[in-house]
Structure formats: structure tokens, C-alpha cells
Image (cartoon, rainbow, N blue to C red):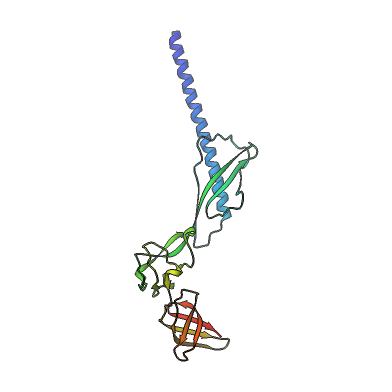
Amino acid sequence: MTPKTLLRLLIFFIGLTSTFFSNFVLGSQQNILEQVQQTAEQFVTALIDPPDNGELHVQASPLDSRLRLSPCPTELEATVPGKQSLTGNVTVLVKCPAADWQVYVPVKTQLMLPRVVATKPLGRGMVITTDDLTIQMVDLRFQRGMIFERPAQIIGSKMKRNVKMGDTIQGNDICLVCRNDTVRINAGGSNLSIITEGVALSDGSLGEQVRVQNARSKKIINASVTAVGEVSVSY
């Protein structure tokens, strides 16, 4: 074997070894970064207790591949620094005290809850029917005011404003009891319950107070909206 050929083989061997070592280091670094992300996700997941009908989605953002972290000989530690809300985006501090490094990891959280949404555009004045509604999982961040979990709660109510297809139906979008509607008044006390009729003098959604005139006595009372076309008053 000539010296020239030997030199070529040596250069090839060195190049092959360098490539193998480089790939090994990159693979090792990728594993460490994935471990950091998983630690952040698991920590946030443990902090949030979703309701039985909810879905929790937790996703750590990809870390900069240029980070060079040495392997941690002990279990990674995670904290949420400062006073952060756990809804939306949260920053988790993951560190390895034994190797003296720490990384801030952005984590996105989504708490999805079942909500009543419109299956088509609903215009002001429309009376809601079964075909107008469905149930979808909606991110808690995009829920404002009064919302509904079951279509039966609002079927028969009237739209007070326009709602686009796919939008969550909110309490201020509708009136379960609308002004000038004939409503059933449930009046109850400790020993007696009376059902009578009246006329609503104002609009109201579930749980809101409305003014109602008793059809018989003509007396005007304040009552709480309990269902479509129904109010209740205690005495």
C-alpha cells in the first residue's frame, strides 16, 4: 500500500469517525431537549385539574436546537416562576442543579369544555330550534359571560343579536324571556306553591332578574328567569 493510499484511508477514517461522533452528539442533545419538554408538559398537566367533562391539552414549544445541555445525572426539576395564569401560555423553568443549567420552556395549555354553538348563522329575532344548535369542545379562553352546555336549555329562546355559524351561544345573545312575552310564573313559599301567568316587561336570560306583570292581579314583580318562558319568585 502506497503512502498516498494510506493517507487517503486515514482521512476517510477520520471523516467517518467525525460524522459518527457528530451524529451521536446531536442525537444525545435532541434526547435531552425532548426530556426537558416532557418535564415541562408533565409539570403543568399535574397542576391543572380539568372537570370530568373537559379535555386538557398541554404542548411545550420546540426548544432551540442550538442549545447544548449536558446530561443530567439526577431528576429534572420544574417550577412556574412568578404569578402566572395556567390558562393559555405559561413559562416553565426546568433545571438540573447537578449539571448547573436551566431552561425556560414556553408551554401552551388548552382546557376544552362542551358548549352549545350555532350550526348556522342566526339572525336577530329568530326563535332557536333544535336544528340550530350543536355541542362542540371550546377553549376556555374564548368563553365569556354566561354559556350553555345543553341545547335544551335555550331551545325556544329568541336571538337578540346576530351570531355566526360555529360561534358559542352566550347569555347576552338571547332572551329566554323576552319583553311582552306571556310567561309562566312559579311562585313558592315554605308551605305553598302557585303557578300563574304574566307578561314580561323586560328581556332576560337564564338566572337574570326581569320585571313581570301578573295577568290576574296586574301587580308588577321582580322574578328570576328559570327556563324558556318561565320565571320564579319566592315569598
In what quadrant of the picture does the N terminus appear? top left
Q: Residue furthest right?
A: 98
All told, the count of numbered labels is: 0
Q: Residue at x 52, y 48 (%)?
A: 107
Q: Residue at x 38, y 61 (%)?
A: 166
Q: Residue at x 45, y 15 (%)?
A: 9
The answer to whether 19 appears left or right of 131 in the picture is right
* Residue 17: percent from left, percent from top: 49, 23
Seen from the viewer's position, the closer of residues 104 and 208 is 208
Rendered image quadrant of residue 157: bottom left
Q: Residue furthest top?
A: 2
Rendered image quadrant of residue 180: bottom left
Q: Residue at x 50, y 45 (%)?
A: 61
* Residue 3: percent from left, percent from top: 45, 8
* Residue 29: percent from left, percent from top: 53, 35
Seen from the viewer's position, the closer of residues 157 and 100 is 157
The answer to whether 134 is drawn above or below residue 34 in the figure is below
The answer to whether 197 is drawn above or below residue 60 in the figure is below
The answer to whether 140 is drawn above or below residue 12 in the figure is below
Seen from the viewer's position, the closer of residues 112 and 179 is 179
Q: Residue furthest bottom?
A: 217
In what quadrant of the picture does the C terminus appear? bottom right
* Residue 66: percent from left, percent from top: 51, 34
